Image (cartoon, rainbow, N blue to C red):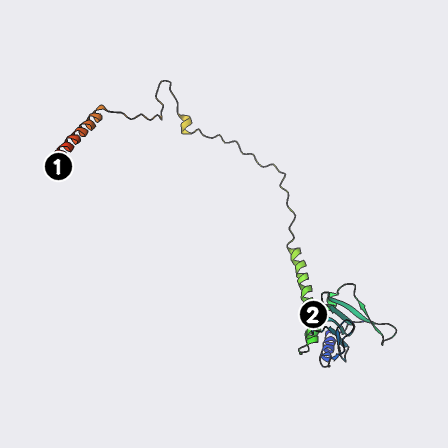
Amino acid sequence: MAESSPETLKTAVLALSRVHAVEGPPGENGLRTVWHMGTDGAELMSQVDSDGRVRRQELTLLEDHYMWASGEGVRTGRVESEGGPTVPVVKADPQLVPHRLVRAAQAMGTYTGQDRYILHMQRVLALAREGLEMAGAGVIIRESQRPSEPTLPSLESAPVSPPVTPEPSQEEQVQYVFGAPHPHEVAPPVSRGSEGMVMLAVFGVGVVVGLLLLIWLL
C-alpha cells in the first residue's frame, strides 16, 4: 500500500479538528475513554484518569497508527485490512519507525485549535520527533569527535651531535703554589695597641668630669 501524501495527512488532521469528542463512562480500570472520530481517516482515542490526566492515546492517520502510554513513550504501527476493508487490524512495528513518526508530527503540527486531547497528542509526537533529532545529532557528533589513530615515531636514526666539552671555570683555572697564600684568602683584621690607650684616656676623662659634677651638685 502506497503511503499517503503529506497534504492528505494534513487534510485528515483538519477534519479531526472539526469533530466533537465523545466521552464514555469510566471503565474497570477507572479510566474514561474520549473518542475523536474524523471523517477523512483520522481517529484519536484518549484514556483519562479521574484527575483529568491523559494516560494513554492512540492516533490513526489513514494507514499509519501511533500509540502512546504514560511512562512508555511512543510506538508506531500500520493499519491493515484482513478479511475485507471493513476489518482493519493494527500491527505494531517491532521498533519505532522514524519516518512514520516524522510524518505524523508534521501533519499534527498544522493543528491550531484548542482541543486539549488533540493538543496533547500533538505535543507527544513533537517531543518524540525532537528526541529522534537529538539522538541523530549525537551520533554525528560522536563520529566527528572520534580520535584519530596515533602515529608511531620515526625509525630513522637522528643525527648524533659531537659531545661538547665544558670549559673550565675560573676556580678550576687557579693554580696553587706550595707555601704561597691562597689566591682568595682574606687577611684577618689588624689590631693596633694605640686604639686601646685612646679608649682608656677617654674613660679616665669621663670619670673626672663625673666627679666634678657630683661635687658641684653637693
Q: Is residue 78 above or below residue 175?
A: below
Which residue, as the protein is rendered here, is positioned at the far left? 216
Residue 131 pos. (x, y %): 68, 64
Quadrant in the picture for the C terminus = top left
Q: What residue do we see at 67% from left, 68% from top?
A: 127
Q: State the image coordinates of residue 154 (x, y, percent, origin top left).
A: 62, 40
- Which quadrant does the N terminus fall into? bottom right
Residue at position x 71%, y 69% in the image = 102
Residue at 75% x, 69% y: name it: 67
**Could you tell me residue 158's position as x and y percent?**
58, 37
As rendered, which of 94 and 184 lies closer to the eye?
94
Task: Return the mark for residue 146.
Answer: none
| Pointer 2 or 1: first along the chain | 2
Q: Is residue 154 left or right of residue 91?
A: left
Circle on res. 124 = 2
Could you say where residue 145 lies in the image, as x and y percent from the top left?
A: 64, 54
User: Which one is in front in this view, the residue at disc 2 or the one at disc 1?
Assistant: 1
Q: Nearer the viewer, residue 199 or 91?
A: 199
Rounded to the nearest angstrom, the CA distance separating label 2 from label 1 is: 115 Å
Q: Is residue 167 above or below residue 44?
A: above
Q: Quadrant of residue 152?
A: top right
Label 1 sits on residue: 217
The three-letter code of the residue at mark 1 reads Leu
Residue situated in front as seen by the camera: 120 or 102: 120
Q: Is residue 214 visible?
A: yes
Quadrant of residue 137 in the image?
Answer: bottom right
- Describe the element under mark 2 as helix, strand or loop: helix
Horizontally, residue 208 falls left or right of residue 39, namely left
Q: Amino acid at mark 2?
A: Val
Local SS, label 1: helix
